[in-house]
Structures are given as structure tokens and as C-alpha cells.
Image (cartoon, helix red, strand yellow):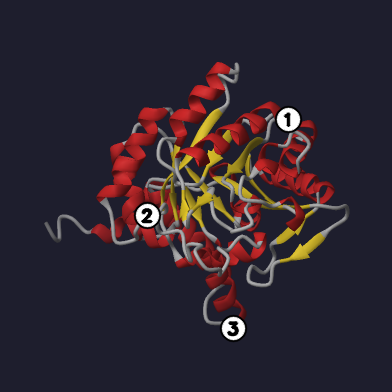
Amino acid sequence: MFPLQRDRRLRTNESIRSLVRETSLSPQDFMLPMFVAEGKDVKIPIASMPGIYRHSLNHTVAEVKEAWDLGIRAVNLYVKVSENLKDNTGKEAWNKDGLMQQTIKAIKDAVPEMIVMPDVALDPYSIYGHDGIIEKGYVVNDATVDALTRMSLSHAEAGADFVAPSDMMDGRVLAIRKALEQNGHHNVGIMSYSAKYASAFYGPFREALDSAPVDAQEIPKDKKTYQMDYANRIEAIKEALHDVEEGADIVMVKPGIAYLDIVREVKNAVNVPVSVYHVSGEYAMIKAAAERGWLDHDKIMIEQLYCIKRAGASIISTYFAKEAAALLNK
């Protein structure tokens, strides 16, 4: 009791504050999301995400090398495929010579120790912009799971360390795990997007991949029949537990800052690492406010990343990865 206990004694200066600090943050905590485009020497800026680009394969490899040198040890891959390769089956997703498969091989050849986690979902390959196959105006589950399984196997065969299903279909983790085991990919892990919410924070990401749901008759206008209702908490715990039971090695909560209560709940419930996606809208808000001089960019960036780590994240997938790593390295 006061004055025997004065809590401010442990805040007197930076030396004591750093000595008793409960949470640490380092470049090894980050995963860098990357957008890959077809062509050579391509670098297309994403207007709503200043500093982020769609890179062709050669520039992607160069960026991976830069990330490795900064201490970043994992990348999360997304591809922007040509419109003529899109259909309602997603078959380009498991083309052994597809853009994703080429990218995985090129990165593993250039930086073998970098952990490569390609995205597993059909929206970049879908003419409708949905994460699954559409039949009679509905995203069907089981046919989509079959497609995602084929996609995951092709990623494993290309050299991926983990596959990262982000689709939110029921039972896909179990189907993928069984297929990986049956085909000898025992050491390929699964990072499951277990609690992925139907969030408005994804807007800039959909611009980056041109993967928003199309506005057409009899096509769902949003992803609410498979992504989670942001009003729900218990459902996130249930989803994460199901995925762990089905063989997920890492579970993810997405988005990040607005969902830190979910991060902590999931962390308390599971016995595997928890990844958090600090998403495009969260990135864009900081960039926009900083450009106007309303916020201190670096201080807000680092504070948010610390808060995500404090909430229970083992891995933070963030577009700030390179900037934050460079700052922390100083």
C-alpha cells in the first residue's frame, strides 16, 4: 500500500523500464505479406497502401533477400493472375507451372532458410472474386475443399514450408493435412486462418489483387457466408480449436488491432502458436494519418505491433515488417 508501494519507481527511467518490460518485439516476430505479379521488372504501386507494390518474380526475390537481411524469417505470398486464367473452378491455382508455384521455387532457391507460406484460397483465381466455387449463387463448401487440397499439394511440391488456407471453409484443414500426409509431405505445416472475420479493413488488399467479389446477379455481394461475423467471440475460439484438432500447426486471427480481445481469447484456448494479420486497412489508416501530420508514423507503427504481440501473437503478418525491422535494428 502507498507509500510502501510506489508503482512509479519502476517507470523512473528507460533503463528500469526496459529491465522490467513484459513484452519484447524483434524482426523475427514478423511475417512479410507479398504481392506477386506476372511479367519481368514489374513494380506496380498500390495506391491505397503507400510503399507496397505488386512485384514481378525477379523483384520479389530481391525483396525477400532484403527482408532476410533485416532479420525477417517468413513471407506470406499472394499472386495477381491474369484475367484469362480465372474461372469458377480455380484450376490455375494448382498449375505446377503457375505464378505461385514459380514464386515458391524461386524464393527457396534464392533464400533457402526463408519460411515460405503461400496463401491458399481461390479468390485470386475466381472470375467471381470469391474464396470458393459458386453453384446456384452460393459458395459451396466440399467442392471448394477439394480444390484447396489440390492447391495445397501443388504448393508443397513447389517447396513451401507451410500452406496457409485463408478461405474459412469447413473441414479444409483436415482434408489438407490428410493429403499432405498421404503424399509424403509430413514436414509441410499448416497455418490456418482460423478466425478470419468479414471485415471492412480488407479493402486495400482487394485492390492489390483485384479480388473483390463481383457485382453481378445471383453472385454473393460479400463473404459473410464463410468469413466470421465480427460481433462474435465464442465462435472464434471454436474455429481455432477445430483447426488444431484437424492438424493446424499455427492458427491465425485476422484482422489485428481491432480484434485483440479475440487474439487473447484464442491464445488462452489453444496450445499452438497464434499468428495475427495486421491487415491492409490498418496499415492504410496509419499511412494516411501520418501523411497529414495527424499521427507520428513510427511511434504508432511500433506501438500497434507491440500491442499485437502483448495480446498473444507469436507471429505478426504486417505490411510494416520491413520498416519496423529496420527501426528495431537501430
Circle 1: is it few (<14), some (14-19), or many (20+) Cα within 10 Å? few
Q: Which mark is residue 292?
A: 3
**In which quadrant will I find the C terminus?**
bottom right
In the displayed image of the protein, which residue is found farthest to the right?
A: 40
- Disc 3 element: loop
Instruction: Using residue 91 as the reference point, say whether residue 219 is left or right of it.
Output: left
Q: Which residue is mark 2?
A: 228
Measuring from the top left, give residue 311's x and y in whole percent: 36, 50
Q: What x and y, as percent, mark residue 178?
A: 49, 23
- Whether residues under marks 1 and 3 lie with C-beta atoms below 8 angstroms apart, the answer is no
Separation of marks 3 and 2 at Cα, in angstroms: 33 Å
Instruction: Measure how far apart labels 1 and 2 are at the Cα level.
Output: 35 Å
**The disc labelled 1 sits on which kind of residue?**
Pro
Which of the pair 20/32 is nearer the observer?
32
Asked if the residue at tag 2 contacts the one at tag 1, i.e. Cβ–Cβ closer than 8 Å, the answer is no
Q: Residues within 10 Å of mark 3 (few under 14, many from 20)?
A: few
Residue 321 vs 145, above or below: the answer is below
Give the mark nearest the N terminus, 1 or 2.
1
**Could you tell me which residue is drawn at 34 percent across and 35 percent down?**
242
Q: Disc 1 vs disc 3: which is toward the camera?
A: 1
Q: Amino acid at mark 2?
A: Met
- Residue under the image location 68 percent in, 72 percent down: 47
Given the current orientation, which residue lies at the most extreme front position? Answer: 136
Q: Which mark is residue 204?
A: none
Q: Which of the marked residues, 3 or 2, is nearer the chain's N terminus?
A: 2
Residue 41 appears in the picture as rendered: yes
Spot occupied by residue 255 in the image (x, y as percentages of width and height): 45, 57
